[in-house]
Structures are given as structure tokens and as C-alpha cells.
Image (cartoon, grey):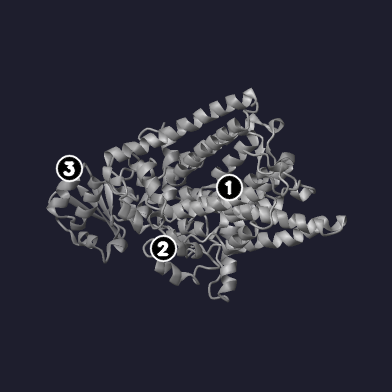
Amino acid sequence: MSDVATEPDVAPAVTEADQPARRLRLPEWGAATIGSFLLAIAMTWLIPPYAADLASGGVKPATIGNPATTIAGDGGDTAAQAWLVAWDGHALKHGLSGWWESNAFYPAKYGLALNDTLFGYVPAGLIGHGMTAALLRYNILFVFAFGLAFLGGYALVRQLGAGRVAAAVAGAALAYTPWRYGHIGHLNILSTGGITLAFAMLARGHGWSLARGYLRERVRPGWAIAGWVVAAWQVSLGFGVGLVFVYMLALTFLCAGVGWLVRGRPPLPGRLILGDLGGGLFFTAVTGYFAYAYQHIRELYPDVLRSWEYTGAFSPTLRGLLVAPGPTLLWGKMHEPGRMALGVADNEKALLCGYALYLLAFGGMFLSIWSMRQRLLMLAGTVVGVLFALGTNGPTYRLLYLYVPGFDGSRTPGRLILWPTILLAVLAAGFVAGLARAARNATLPEWRRPAALVVTVPLLVAVLAEGLPDLAHVRIAPRPAAMAAAPAPFVVLPSDDGFDSTTMIWSTEGFPKMVNGVASYNPPDRQQVRDTMQTFPSAQSLDLLRQHGIRSVVVVRDRVVGTPFELALGAQGVPGLTRRDIGPDVLFTLD
């Protein structure tokens, strides 16, 4: 790590607005934390309905979703994610007995490992019980994920040496970049704030910033330990973004170690060394625990690995960098033809980081508080990161797929766009800070601070405006009485990826064992049950149910109409099967 303070194109901070992180005080961190989460509430819950109403000329009346009865997003994957957090809390209350098995995905083994576990959110899962608590909990965590992403970006850029407005621009770019809304149903992918926050804490603990390099007197071992803990927490949410984070953290410390050797091994405080050893071991233990579970899944179900051709179907193209996902307020409808051209899973291939961010990062190549060498390295990192994010449509992703453990089980290379976004945000922050410095130098002393704010705050507003989402708040129907009365294990019909997420959140009322469950991979035995149940109540389906010890079948009438499962509604007097009509639905119990 270089001490860039000696380089001629880096000027020292000269005013309060551009003070580096070394002078941060508790009031700023308190204000930044509170402001991050208040902004998240406004950006994800309060402002979008009114902005959409304004944009539609009143055709789309503003309605604020009820967080206790609706769920942010499409109600599909979001409901499954709400179940995950609820299950984590339920399992912990019972000593984690059967945690990996879960109540869903029966009769599959290690069913929980078919998804990211979101275990880091288990404290929230301990509060309340039932579906209402699951909905409210998820909606709070949804907002929390955006707030933490902003706070993490702010903390990182402040630690690197930029001022408050520049750090806020970076935080806004990382929390509300348009491509994130392509993963609106994936809380595990939206939860990226721990990554930048961990890097900020580790840099602060090691006394390092971009503006001043390494300064031994600014080493804070406690911050380094906190950084390792936050990093472990991030990994415990899942490997959807955690896998790359583990490798990037290892690469960062490898580069830091090489830099330390090259610079003649400057002395390191003993407390910092002990903190890194202890924190690093804790991080490694947490990572190893979850990695072992997912490796076990690979051994149980070898088909869980993704073929190169399958990965290709989910790989974006360069065009995706200019296309926004559907749930973006400013670009969603306008970019619909562009998304259609991206093919299957178009929202996950829409990688727009924000036109405002692109422009600010481009400006940061010419005007910045970072040195030219640093800017060129960040530009190179951005280009390489984008090439990796293109998956099979780029020249580099195959190296990860073939030689780096874990990537052969990932289907969505586009999620790697997170890392170029971080570099773009730092470049943009350098430009905003440089612009503020230029405005101050060009005005009288008493006008320096207002001038800096006048030229930089509108840039922050532009990034936030482009990052407004257009979110649905879907009402989840209450659990059917027939499901409440069903002896477990049971299967709810229809059972498919479109409806099972609803069944999962219904199951938060008591967590009974059931076949239903949504994951990116379906184990063969569970898929066999799903397929065979399309002929229920055939003799073949009844034999299979008895083979797996499944005791009952719930048929949700208004969901099976028009599907192969509709055959079950007409079943009467089947030997070995007792039928009960409970409300509009039907419960079949095997004798």
C-alpha cells in the first residue's frame, strides 16, 4: 500500500467539508447511520409511490404498502426469503436442531443449503412468530439492506480520504444503483453493505487510506477486529455475493503483505498482529463452516453444478451495462425493449450502474483527489471486473469457472458487477471531492463551504433520483384453513416454483414438514414428487406419497384451476384416501 500523500497531484484536505476519516467523530457517524436508514425508508418505501403517481399524471395513485400485510417486490422470491429468516430464528430457538434440513424441501436432505441461508439476520428471526411477523421482519430487513449499503459506501470513501458529500455520493451509488433492482427478490444479493463496511473498518484498523497511505500512529486494532467480525457476518448471509468477497478479501491482504515486504517491512503493532490473527481465524472458521455445508450439497446432488452452457443462458452482454431492470422508476419502462433483447432472466442481465455514476466516474479520470496512478488502477479494475461479469460472453470468466472453487455452482455471472460498481463509486467520489476543492479554491474564504456544497450536492441528488425504484407491494393471502389442518409431512398443490414461495411463508405458522420449497436447484427425489403429483390421486402418486411418508395433500382451489393439478378437485371416494372440503380448499389424508 503506497503513501500517496507525497505524490504531487494529491493536495491535502483544507476545509472541514473535505476532512479525512482520521478526524471523524461520533456525531458524524451517528448522523451518517441515522441518515442512511432514514434515507432508505424514504427511497424504498415512501417516495416511489408519490414519484410514480407524479410521473403517471395521477393514473397510478400513490399507495404506501402496509409492511404487516404486504411484501416488497413481486411476492415470489421475496416470500421465500422472508421464510428463510423466519426459519433461521425458529431453528435457533430450538437449538439449531434440524436447521440444515428445514421444514421445507421434504424429503430432500440439507434442503436449507439449496439457498443462501441469510443466517446473519437470525437476530431478527428471533423476534415474533407467524406470517405477520415474517412479513414485517422481511420488509424491515429489506430497508435495512439499502441503508447498510449506503452506510458502508459512505464509511469506505470517508476512510479512503474524501469529504462528506463525496462519500454520500458513493454511498448513494452503491445502495441505489439501478442494477440492484434486478435482484429485488433476492435479499441475499441486496445485502452488500457488510462488504464495504468491513473494508472500511479493516482499512481504519490498519491505519491506511488512499490519501495518506499507511501511518503507524493511526493504527486501531479494535477497528481491525470489528472489520473481521463484519466480514464474517457478511459471509454468513450466503455465498451469492459472499463467495467473491472471500476471494477479494484474501487478494487484498495478499497485496498488502507484498506491499509491506517491498517497503522494507515497516513495524506493525503487536496488538494489530494479534487482532488480525484472531479476527482472521474467526472469519476463516465461519467461512469454512458454511463452505462445508455447501460442499456437502455438491456431494449429495452432483447435478447442482452448473454446466458452461447453462451459465451462458444467464450471462449478460455489454449492452446490459446500458439497460436498467424493470423495477427502476426512471428507466424501467423506457428500457423494456432493451431488456427483451437480453433474453432469458433479462432483469438479472440488466447491469446499468447509473448514467450519473458513469459520468461522475468519467470526470474522476480528469479531476480528482486521487492520484493518477490510483485512478488508472481503478479504471483497469473496473474493466477487468466488467469482463468477468459478462460470464460466458467475456474472455475471463472461464478462468473462474474452471480454476476457482465455487464458481462452477454459480449461475449468474452478472452479480459480479458489484465490484466494478464499487470502483466506479470511488472514482466518482474522487471527482466530487476534487470539484469541491476547485470550487473552494476559486472563491473567497467566507464562500468556500457554500460554493463546495452548491457544486456537489446536486450531483448527489442526481444519483439518488436515478436510483429511485418502482416497487410493487404484494399482499400475501392468509394461510388456508386446509393447510392448518393437514397432518405433516404434506404437499400443497400446486407445487411449482411460481407458487411454492407462498406456501413457504404460510408455513411460518408452526413450520410443519412439507414437500414445497423454492430453490435454484430441485433434488431429484423432490422433483419426482412434484411431477407425479400432477396425476394425483392416481395409484402411482399414492404409492409415491406412502413411500416418502407423506401423510396428506392440500389442494388450493383457486391456484390449481387451469393447471395439471386441477384433476385432484374432482377426486371422490378414492380407496385409502379421505377427503375433507375445508372452506374453498380440499384436504386429502392418506389412511
Q: Which residue is mark 2?
A: 346
Q: Tag 2's secondary structure?
A: helix
Give the CA separation, mark 2 to mark 1.
27 Å
Q: Can you tell which of label 2 and label 3 is closer to the viewer?
A: 2
Q: Is residue 434 above or below residue 198?
A: below
Residue 107 image label = none
Give the residue type that dot 2 points to: Asp
293 relative to 246 in the view: left or right: left
Q: Is residue 326 above or below residue 428?
A: below
243 relative to 148 in the view: left or right: left
Q: Nearer the viewer, residue 485 or 324?
A: 324
Q: Which residue is mark 1?
A: 148
Residue 547 image label = 3
- Image spot of residue 429 (x, y percent): 65, 53
* Quadrant (top left/top right/bottom left/bottom right) for the N terminus: top right
Name the N-terminal-most of marks 2 and 1: 1
Image quadrant where residue 550 sits = top left
Residue 94 visible in this rendered orientation of the protein = no
Give the CA separation, mark 2 to mark 3.
40 Å
Q: How many dots with numbers?
A: 3
Q: Is residue 321 above or below residue 120?
A: below
Marks 2 and 1 in Cβ contact (< 8 Å): no
Give the CA separation, mark 3 to mark 1.
47 Å
> Which residue appears at 48% of the width and 59% of the height?
351
Name the N-terminal-most of marks 2 and 3: 2
Marks 2 and 3 in Cβ contact (< 8 Å): no
448 relative to 210 in the view: left or right: right
Give the residue type that dot 1 points to: Leu
Q: Nearer the viewer, residue 528 or 240?
A: 240
- Image spot of residue 494 (x, y percent): 28, 57
Q: Nearer the viewer, residue 101 or 272?
A: 272
